[in-house]
Image (cartoon, rainbow, N blue to C red):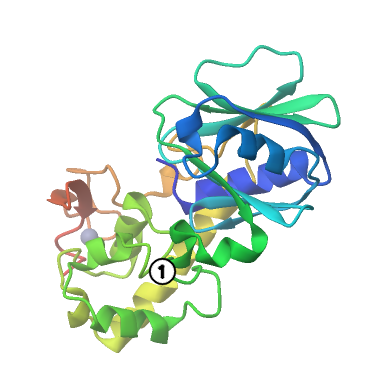
Amino acid sequence: MPELPEVEMVARHLRKLIAGRTITKAQLLRAKLAPENPPRQFAAWLKGARVEDVTRRGKHILTHLSNKRTWVTHLRMTGRFVHVDADEAPPPHTHAAFWLDNGRKLLFADQRHFGMMLVVKTSELDTVSHLSKLAPEPFDAAFNASYLHEALQRSKQAIKLFLLDQTRVTGLGNIYAAEALHRAKINPQLPANKLSRARAEALHSEIVAVLTEAIEAGSTLETDPREVYGRYGDGAYEDSWRVYEREGLPCLTCGEAIQRLAQGGRSTYFCPRCQR
Ligand SMILES: [Zn+2]
């Protein structure tokens, strides 16, 4: 599943491809992709709109349109955009198509069918339930050590699970939560409210650092102009993972074997010596 750095790459890539372009026609091919927009409304609200910008909020891609509407996309597990000539046959599992005024079209393909789209009035964007509950963006000034420490104090959840809760911290998934905890030398099972102010500060720094490094690693990649997809787990930043999927391998800091445990139904990787 793409995490924040991968979604950021997709948003940046999309911006290069479609900002300034007008959508001449849109078609929702699988109605459940956009359950809150009937297919005719989805098509009508996008048709004729010029793309002003493409940004990201959490793992949502926000395409800002000239008609005071915003087109929201969540890739979930396998959603991806493909940018091809207008007459090219769509790949399997294409669930939506967007024709552009330059003879190209953008397709949304999603093998696992978990992707989500939504077109809303921009003035109502803050009330969209997918977005309104999200914590501040990790790179915003509002996400600082004080914010994190106060949020931690209000939770008795294991710190790893706390970090995955997008209403408390936005942008960490299973990989980067494990990496940030290792870098900050925090045991993933520690209750959130047991973290001291100093350790919360260290964790805040490492969250920002690991996400920044992952984005920088990804942004230097040569991306396929056809596949508007952030690289995921195929070398972009994988070589930098210090604990994720390294069970039994030596900790890069101390040499102890990395351990894996199950938390919330997912694997957590950590060093039992460094992370106490
Ligand atoms: Zn270690």
Residue beneath disc 1:
206
Q: Residues within 10 Å of mark 1 (few under 14, many from 20)?
A: many
**Split into 4 quadrants, where in the image is the N terminus?**
top left
Residue 118 is situated, as x and y percent measured from the top left of the image, at: 55, 46
Residue 53 is situated, as x and y percent measured from the top left of the image, at: 74, 53
Spot the residue most to the right. 102
Rendered residue at 37%/67% (across/down): 167
Rendered residue at 43%/24% (across/down): 111
Q: Quadrant of residue 169?
A: bottom left
Q: Amino acid at mark 1?
A: Glu
Residue 206 is situated, as x and y percent measured from the top left of the image, at: 41, 69
**Residue 225 visible somewhere in the drawing:** no
Q: Say left or right for 28 vs 148.
A: right
**Residue 251 visible somewhere in the drawing:** yes
Q: Quadrant of residue 184?
A: bottom left
* Residue 203 higher or lower than 125, as above or below: below
Instruction: Identify the element where label 1 is drawn.
Output: helix
Compare residues 186 and 19 and report the one nearer the observer. 19
Rendered residue at 20%/47% (across/down): 267
Compare residues 149 and 85 and report the one nearer the observer. 85
**Split into 4 quadrants, where in the image is the C terminus?**
bottom left
Q: How many marks?
A: 1
For ligand 1, tell me if the residue under mark 1 lies within 8 Å: no
Which quadrant contains ligand 1? Answer: bottom left
Compare residues 28 and 63 and report the one nearer the observer. 28
Q: Say left or right for 90 vs 197.
A: right
* Residue 167 higher or lower than 245, as above or below: below
Residue 91 is situated, as x and y percent measured from the top left of the image, at: 57, 16
